[in-house]
Image (spheres, grey):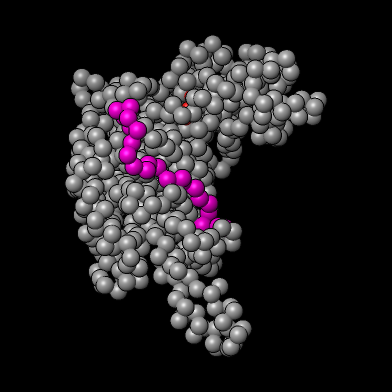
């Protein structure tokens, strides 16, 4: 289906033409109830989208798109366990991973019979490590956990572990290793005690090059240091949908925790892939995280679309991308603990919806996912915000902040939040030439004022949403992640995409395996393109 040919799309386009000349200053002046109309609350969350370049009519028109696209039916299909990931012939049931009760999605298809016992096994394993009961090969308790994984087997758990470090076990260190570059693993190994270290090999497929090479190197290091291959059984566990491959690697069957083909990699933090996180924060806090996500699932499934947080967030993205022409979306957490949230979102959004061929195999008629990027907002202010304020490009921003700090120091939280709110206000409202002139005229006049004046003007009208969290507790974070997951699903449905495959990452993997032998053997490079040959020549000269 071509969504751009629908009556709903055309109505939005007509509305855009009348609304787009109106500045955010004017939109605020026109409607005293604007903030009430354009904000939503959900438990510990407040989503203020009043600084988007839209009004209540825009939202109502956008909601019509969900009907044209069949969002309600698609949601029922996903929650019902239908194989909506058609290119991989798989159901999409990560929502099952946060449910507390069986059966789900139905008595016939119940996946909870495997989900719940796995969660219990994870909890028992995590408790043994937390309590010091789990002993390494030499009889010393495990005190360090290293999660080896990449993409979805790294980003989500790492992001949440950092976000929840204020409640993490004080005597356990948890590290995340993802990069092929040995500059990540090698210095870490130098700091580790093999007698007290546990490696978690997190890989849905158990074939990913980065993870397998890092896991093999860690295994070699462990065996070399403990002097016995039998040590692997006590120092390795696996989180995978391919348990037989983990056993072949040498990992004990009892230390293999399953996930299933219906869990997409970027949605796997709720599965056994979350084990390192569960070890860090404990099974109780982990259960709260799941509960927060489950509550967001229910909100998404049952709330009318005009008040439905993920749906509204998705529609704002579609408005900015397809009607206002934005090509990027900045994610700006004003909270140190959300440092890794932008990179987590990059995979979630861009691997899901960074596609231009629809689920029907036809090219889509409209732009799809914008480039998601971001950085801690306060640091960004002193780096790239200049471009947001005066670069003349449309860059919609997601500001994210928590009202309470987890590591309070006098004066910091107030100043941090003042900066967050100031930035979104300055981006929205800017500073007119008259305002700039009147400010400058207090200290200068004549030619000097005229020369400086253009540099002091801020066009404003840069759209943003602000998502406030009461605090970064597990429940609120669970809801936050599920919110963005469902946003991605909604956008995928409206854009006509399969949000759950990722064929675009395959070509690079195949090319890398054809280049690898040529790195060390020049004769094998002759069939490669001239640029690659040149890069390999340079590399070979310097590799030794
Ligand atoms: O190559 C992309 C990808 O498949 C992601 O989708 C996934 O999260 C990541 O690689 C890691 O995959 P795995 O968990 O199978 O090692």
Residue 461 in view? yes
Coordinates of residue 396 in the picture (x, y in percent):
42, 55
277 vs 98, left or right, is right
Q: Is residue 238 magenta?
A: no
Q: Residue at x 43, y 49 (%)?
A: 327
Coordinates of residue 337 in the picture (x, y in percent):
51, 50
Front position in the image: 18 or 163: 18
Q: Is residue 58 above or below residue 489?
A: below
Q: Residue at x 40, y 59 (%)?
A: 464
Q: Quadrant of residue 260?
A: top left
Coordinates of residue 3 in the picture (x, y in percent):
25, 40
418 vs 362, left or right, is right
Front position in the image: 436 or 382: 436
Instruction: Name the image quarter holding the N terminus.
Output: top left
In the image, the segment drawn in magenta is: 358-380
Coordinates of residue 409 in the picture (x, y in percent):
55, 63
Front position in the image: 291 or 514: 514
Q: Residue at x 46, y 16 (%)?
A: 243
Q: Is residue 356 above or below residue 252?
A: below
Q: Quadrant of residue 93?
A: top left
Front position in the image: 345 or 241: 345
Instruction: Name the image quarter holding the C terminus.
Output: top right
């Amino acid at each position: 289906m071509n969504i751009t040919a629908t009556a709903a799309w055309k109505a939005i386009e007509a509305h855009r033409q009348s609304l787009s000349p109106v500045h955010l200053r004017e939109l605020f002046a026109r409607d005293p109830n604007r903030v009430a109309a354009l904000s939503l609350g959900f438990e510990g969350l407040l989503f203020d989208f009043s600084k988007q370049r839209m009004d209540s009519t825009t939202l109502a028109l956008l909601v019509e798109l969900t009907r044209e696209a069949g969002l309600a039916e698609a949601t029922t299909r996903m929650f019902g366990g239908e194989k909506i990931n058609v290119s991989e012939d798989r159901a999409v049931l990560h929502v099952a991973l946060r449910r507390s009760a069986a059966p789900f999605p139905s008595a016939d298809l119940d996946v909870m019979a495997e989900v719940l016992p796995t969660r219990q096994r994870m909890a028992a394993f995590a408790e043994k490590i937390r309590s010091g009961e789990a002993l390494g090969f030499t009889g010393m308790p495990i005190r360090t956990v290293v999660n080896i994984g990449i993409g979805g087997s790294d980003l989500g758990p790492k992001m949440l572990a950092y976000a929840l470090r204020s409640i993490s076990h004080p005597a356990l260190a948890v590290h995340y290793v993802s990069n092929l570059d040995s500059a990540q693993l090698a210095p870490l190994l130098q700091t580790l005690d093999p007698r007290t270290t546990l490696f978690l090999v997190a890989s849905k497929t158990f074939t990913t090059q980065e993870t397998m090479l890092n896991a093999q190197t860690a295994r070699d290091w462990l065996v070399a240091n403990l002097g016995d291959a039998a040590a692997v059984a006590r120092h390795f566990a696996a989180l995978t949908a391919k348990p037989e491959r983990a056993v072949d690697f040498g990992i004990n069957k009892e230390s293999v925790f399953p996930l299933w083909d219906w869990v997409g990699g970027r949605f796997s933090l709720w599965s056994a892939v979350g084990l390192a996180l569960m070890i860090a924060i404990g099974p109780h806090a982990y259960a709260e995280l799941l509960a927060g996500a489950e509550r967001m699932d229910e909100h998404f499934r049952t709330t009318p679309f005009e008040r439905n947080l993920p749906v509204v967030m998705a529609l704002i993205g579609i408005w900015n991308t397809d009607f206002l022409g934005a090509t990027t979306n900045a994610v700006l957490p004003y909270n140190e603990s959300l440092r890794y949230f932008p990179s987590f979102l990059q995979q979630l959004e861009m691997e899901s919806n960074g596609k231009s061929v629809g689920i029907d195999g036809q090219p889509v008629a409209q732009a799809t996912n914008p480039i998601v990027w971001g950085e801690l907002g306060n640091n960004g202010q002193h780096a790239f915000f200049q471009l947001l304020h005066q670069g003349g490009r449309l860059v919609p921003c997601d500001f994210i902040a928590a009202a309470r700090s987890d590591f309070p120091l006098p004066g910091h939280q107030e100043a941090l939040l003042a900066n967050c709110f100031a930035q979104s206000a300055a981006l929205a409202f800017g500073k007119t030439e008259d305002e700039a002139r009147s400010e400058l005229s207090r200290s200068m006049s004549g030619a000097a004022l005229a020369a400086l004046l253009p540099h002091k003007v801020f066009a404003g009208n840069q759209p943003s949403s602000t998502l406030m969290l009461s605090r970064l507790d597990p429940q609120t974070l669970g809801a936050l992640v599920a919110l963005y997951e469902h946003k991605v699903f909604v956008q995928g449905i409206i854009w006509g995409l399969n949000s759950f495959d990722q064929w675009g990452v395959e070509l690079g993997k195949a090319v890398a395996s054809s280049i690898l032998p040529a790195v060390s053997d020049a004769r094998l490079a002759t069939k490669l393109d001239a640029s690659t040959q040149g890069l390999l020549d340079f590399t070979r000269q310097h590799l030794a």
